[in-house]
Image (cartoon, rainbow, N blue to C red):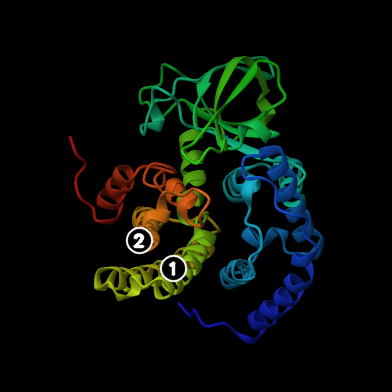
Amino acid sequence: MDLAYDEKEEEFRARLREWLATALPALPPKPDPLDWPGRRAYDCGWQRALYDAGYADVHWDASPTQRLIFLEETERAGAPYVGANFVGLLHAGPTIAAEGTPEQRERWLPPVLRGDEVWCQGFSEPDAGSDLASLRTRAVRDGDAYVVTGSKIWTSHAEVADWCELLVRTDPGAASKHRGISWLAMPMDAPGITVRPLRTLAGSTEFAEMFLDEVRVPVANRVGEENDGWRVTMVTLSFERGTAFVGEVVACRRVLAELARAARENGTWDDPVIRRGLGRLSAEFRALWRLTQWNVSEAEASGGVPGIGGSVFKLRYSHARQELYDTAAAVLGPDALDLGREWNLDRLSSLSYTIAAGTSQIQANIVAERILGLPKGR
């Protein structure tokens, strides 16, 4: 795999840098982190600016190197990340692009790219834990609609979303719990939906619990065949674990550089334990960036869907991110208790990464069974 940038790609980088230099100063002030309607408006406004400039579909319809260049340059320039558009741009959108009908792609993809519509993720359930296939939310066919009843938890961005990528059980009598599941696109303004925001350690409410009481979802909103939702879900999770965190690796490398500067300024650089930790993290994130390049290139070669190598990345990245912010706490010392200081809120957020998008235990099982060929545990 050739990871060098050619002349055309460097021209893309130069154009992007020039545009960012003009676009970023024109952005409105960032909203309060706890104001999710304000954050939605801000994030969607940035997505619209990307759309108008021709960069909106870089996550879907660009070469692997162009995608990586885009992430490098936007992060280096301090541009907004996808924010409230996370599920639509990096989960639901790519899944619909890969598995949806032409009509579904035409209906749902352009509004995501324009920043007109926000999606949330309705996968996890209170009683299923990490065993996603044990979901109980039921969808009963009634003519041209499914009647959905059940509940979801950790529903990302539910309080500001227009649509939900929803997993439901359409055949409770299926021989295996992995069968009888379907993937639906549910409009969040449908009657019967109750959303209750969940407050995180950092005080924000980007997650919610969601209750569904006989919600009618058109059969036409099913992506993939009925009862084939587990396979479609694996496509979604491959994006979530394989390429959705790419931009965050770039952000972590930037934080690491800032952390090293702060250590030199406050004297903690003289502590050999901290200095060795920073050096090891530098090597760790350089390796993760190379793995990212490989995963993105492999996804391109396999039709745009990341492979199981994404689990290797997710497993190691989750722990590396936590180690990064633990090191930040060591550098800050007593100031690590001040949530107004840089990195401290990110440290609280990092605690969830070994659980979100598939726990580390789940990822380790995938690596063991599907990559190393080890037998399944009993």
Residue 253, above or below 50? below
Is residue 119 toward the left or the right of residue 350 in the image? Answer: right
Q: Is residue 308 in view from this perspective?
A: no
Mark 2 lies on residue: 327
- Label 1's element? helix
Mark 1 is on which residue type? Leu
Drawn side of residue 248 relative to residue 147, left or right = left
Q: In which quarter of the image is the C terminus?
A: top left
Q: Residues within 10 Å of mark 2 (few under 14, many from 20)?
A: many
Residue count near mark 1 (Cα–Cα under 10 Å), binned few <14, some 14–19, many ≥20? many
Query: Which sits in the foreground, 22 or 368?
Result: 22
For image coordinates 48% across by 52% down, the residue present is 346
Residue 286 quadrant: bottom left
Residue 293 rendering spot, x and y as whole percentages: 47, 69
Amino acid marked by disc 2: Thr
Q: In the rendered view of the protein, which quadrant contains the N terminus?
A: bottom left
Q: Is residue 141 above or below residue 278?
A: above
67 left or right, relative to 170: right
Frontmost residue, 219 versus 124: 124
Element under disc 2: helix
Count of numbered circles in the view: 2
Q: Are marks 1 and 2 in contact (CB under 8 Å)?
A: yes
| Residue on which the image places disc 1 | 259
The span from disc 1 to disc 2 (Cα, nearest Å) is 9 Å
Instruction: Residue 242 in the image: state x and y as whole percent.
Output: 46, 55
Q: Where is residue 355 in the image (x, y as percent from the top left)?
A: 38, 41
Residue at image coords 69%, 41%: 118
Residue 364 percent coordinates (x, y): 28, 49
